[in-house]
């Protein structure tokens, strides 16, 4: 990730996309092997959000939250990635719904 951040700063967006796709493929293979890997799901959600795949980002972020419901950083990361994918209203509604149902505790 730091490498892609540096490439973005340099304006080398084609290379950024290449590395994001490579990372995405690695993370997808990791999740085939270890589906409960929350960190891989969070990183994959970030890649999906950065590539405009909002629904995939939301799905991965929600799975990460379901796997680690008491980890306060997962919902925060989920909100950031989904917001970057342009779906902030949808995720805010889902968080509000989870809070009301008691599934999400701050």
Image (cartoon, helix red, strand yellow):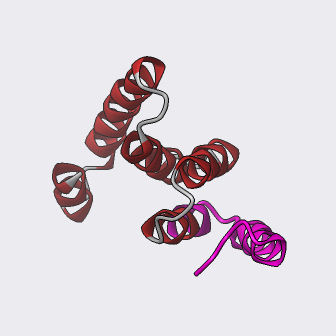
Magenta segment main secondary structure: helix
Return the residue nearer the eye: 18 or 64. 64
- Residue 98: percent from left, percent from top: 77, 69
Q: Residue at x 81, y 73 (%)?
A: 93
Let me know if residue 91 is in the magenta part. Answer: yes
Q: Residue at x 16, y 50 (%)?
A: 3
Q: How many marks?
A: 0
- Residue 73: percent from left, percent from top: 43, 69
Q: Residue at x 23, y 59 (%)?
A: 5
Return the residue nearer the eye: 78 or 11. 78
Return the residue nearer the eye: 35 or 87. 35
Let me know if residue 105 is in the magenta part. Answer: yes
Residue 10 position (above or below residue 58): below
Q: Does residue 52 appear to the left or right of 26 in the view shown?
A: right
- Residue 39: percent from left, percent from top: 37, 47
Q: Does residue 27 appear to the left or right of 77 in the view shown?
A: left
**Figure quadrant of the C terminus:** bottom right
Q: Does residue 17 appear to the left or right of 81 in the view shown?
A: left
Which residue is farthest bottom? 106
- What is the magenta range? 80-106
Residue 12 position (above or below residue 106): above
């Amino acid at each position: 990730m730091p490498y892609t951040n540096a490439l973005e700063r340099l304006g080398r967006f084609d290379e950024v996309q290449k590395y994001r796709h490579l990372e995405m493929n690695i993370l997808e293979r990791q999740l085939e092997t270890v589906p409960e890997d929350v960190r891989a799901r969070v990183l994959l959600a970030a890649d999906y959000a950065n590539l405009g795949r909002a629904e995939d980002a939301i799905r991965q972020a929600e799975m990460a939250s379901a796997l680690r419901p008491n980890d306060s950083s997962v919902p925060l990361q989920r909100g950031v990635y989904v917001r970057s994918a342009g779906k902030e209203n949808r995720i805010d509604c889902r968080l509000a719904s989870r809070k009301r149902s008691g599934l999400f505790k701050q």
